[in-house]
Image (cartoon, rainbow, N blue to C red):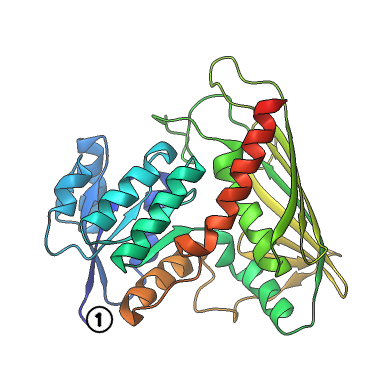
Amino acid sequence: MTKTIKVALAGAGAFGIKHLDGIRLIPGVEVVSLISRDIEKTRDIAARYGIAHVTTELEESLALPEVDAVILCTPTQLHAEQALACLRAGKHVQVEIPLADSLSGAEAVVEQARVSGLVAMCGHTRRFNPSHQYVQQQVQSGRFKLQQMDVQTHFFRRSNINALGEARSWTDHLLWHHAAHTVDLFAYQSGGEIVQANALQGPIHPELGIAMDMSIQLKSSSGAICTLSLSFNNDGPLGTYFRYIGDSATYLARYDDLYTGKEEKIDVSQVDVSMNGIELQDREFFAAIRDGREPNSSVAKVLPCYRILHQLEQQLGQQ
């Protein structure tokens, strides 16, 4: 494909805006349709980004013949259903993490992608952050072997609000959303398959109906182990902090930034063409469409993560 790739973006919330900002920096790509619940707010955002078509219905955008691909930044519970609709409409699709909120949903998307032959990718951004890419390069070159990953994913969230402090129409989830980042990344960086997984969770919030605290342990076939702490109760900085402990070094990763175990900053500015993980994720999606190839973090490649999440959900249900 050499022509401009025309994109519909569904979900003009905090993460949708991050994608719009990233796509602005990618040549040969144009967002031509914006879909979101609040039509007036969506019109305002569309005007800011020069997007001509605005709607509240995904089906309306899928009917546009000029649309080549769709990026879904919609509520978790809609991801699988909407990804299937995009593929059945003949559109390439990138689904923000998580791919689905059930293993059956994830498997259905993977199968539909296989049948359609279209590019179907999930937004496992940690594969693309320059900090984690740097570690992956060290692993692939043989200079670093992961022995342990210690991860903290902490937020302060007592109500349904997004990263912009705006009300959400859906409930976030520590296991199916936030743990998905680390479960996939651990397998990716360890170079093996997850062969053991255990989980514990704290009390269920009486209004939100979800656990506000969770602890997960993982073991890779490589021998590496991972400890993941997740909380919506942390009164402090928001986000995820990774400590990689290996045979030759210790790395501390905070989104796109990387430090040694002694808090010395590592220059990762030359790892890729940008320091923005979301932009790099989108670049991979569009490059895969142009090249007619499977992208890094294709739905098929991340499916093992969702098998582990399903296993952990079953464990938690028995506790």
State the residue in front, 106 or 41.
106
Please name the amino acid that badge 1 sits on: Met
Query: If the image is split into quadrants, where does the N terminus sit?
Result: bottom left
Q: In this view, does 223 lie to the left or right of 104?
A: right
Q: Relative to 225, say whether 40 is above or below.
A: above
In which quadrant of the rendered view does residue 235 lie? top right
In which quadrant of the rendered view does residue 117 lie? bottom left
* Residue 198: image location, x then y, percent: 75, 42
Q: How many marks?
A: 1
* Residue 220: image location, x then y, percent: 76, 60
* Residue 161: image location, x then y, percent: 48, 31
- The residue beneath circle 1 is 1
Query: If the image is split into quadrants, where does the C terminus sit?
Result: top right
Q: Relative to 178, say whether 263 is above or below.
A: below
Q: In this view, does 186 lie to the left or right of 175?
A: right
* Residue 289: image location, x then y, percent: 33, 74
Q: Is residue 235 left or right of residue 305?
A: right
- Residue located at (38% from left, 48% from top): 73
- Residue located at (80% from left, 76% from top): 144
